[in-house]
Amino acid sequence: MLKIFFLLFITVPLLELYLLIEVGSGIGGLSTIALCLFTAALGGLLIRWQGVNTLLDAQKSMARGEIPADHGFHGLLLALAGLMLFLPGFITDTIGFLLLIPPIRQLIINRVMPIRQIGGQPQSDIIDVEIIRNEHHIR
């Protein structure tokens, strides 16, 4: 796993640099910089809007007595999208904008947090138990 991160740490910046140079030679240096700043600003606005919506949905879930774990993962992926959008480059911007699409985030969450199913019904590790104490002592 460490080798994969190291490989990504080396290859992604090199690919970003290559792509920035290619785009810059095609549309010009200032236009490329403006495009990078525009994607960062647009991404920041979209993340703020989706983050507020995710927070409001989580509050509604808690008001209904549900655990908003799914919303927590959405928030984490939105934070990752924000990081990707603020890094300069078109590859990270693409990843960031893809993470802003709720069905793609849900797909990632389902892969990370699979629901176990027994007999076709989703099962969790929570067992509902009621304890009845019998206070009658034999003397």
Image (tube, rainbow, N blue to C red):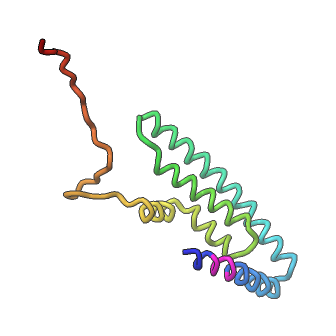
Identity of the residue drawn at 77% across and 66% down = 38
**Horizontal placement of 74 versus 30: left or right?**
left
Q: Main secondary structure of the magenta part?
A: helix
Q: Residue at x 69, y 81 (%)?
A: 10
Depth check: give the residue in front, 36 or 119.
Answer: 119
Q: What's the residue at 85%, 82% (across, down)? A: 28
Foreground of the two, 86 or 134 = 134
Residue nearer the viewer, 120 or 35: 120
Q: Which residues are magenta?
A: 6-11
Residue that protrudes farthest toward the left in the picture: 138
Q: Is residue 7 magenta?
A: yes
Left or right of 1? Residue 27 is right
Query: Which percent across, then down, holds residue 58?
Result: 51, 42
Q: Nearer the viewer, residue 80 or 102?
A: 80
Point 28% across, 42% down: residue: 127
Q: Position of residue 139 (x, y in %)?
A: 12, 12
Q: Locate the N terminus and report the quarter of the image it occupies.
A: bottom right
Extreme residue in the right direction? 30
* Residue 50, magenta (yes or no): no
Q: Quadrant of residue 22?
A: bottom right
Q: Quadrant of residue 138?
A: top left
Q: Position of residue 84 (x, y in %)?
A: 67, 66
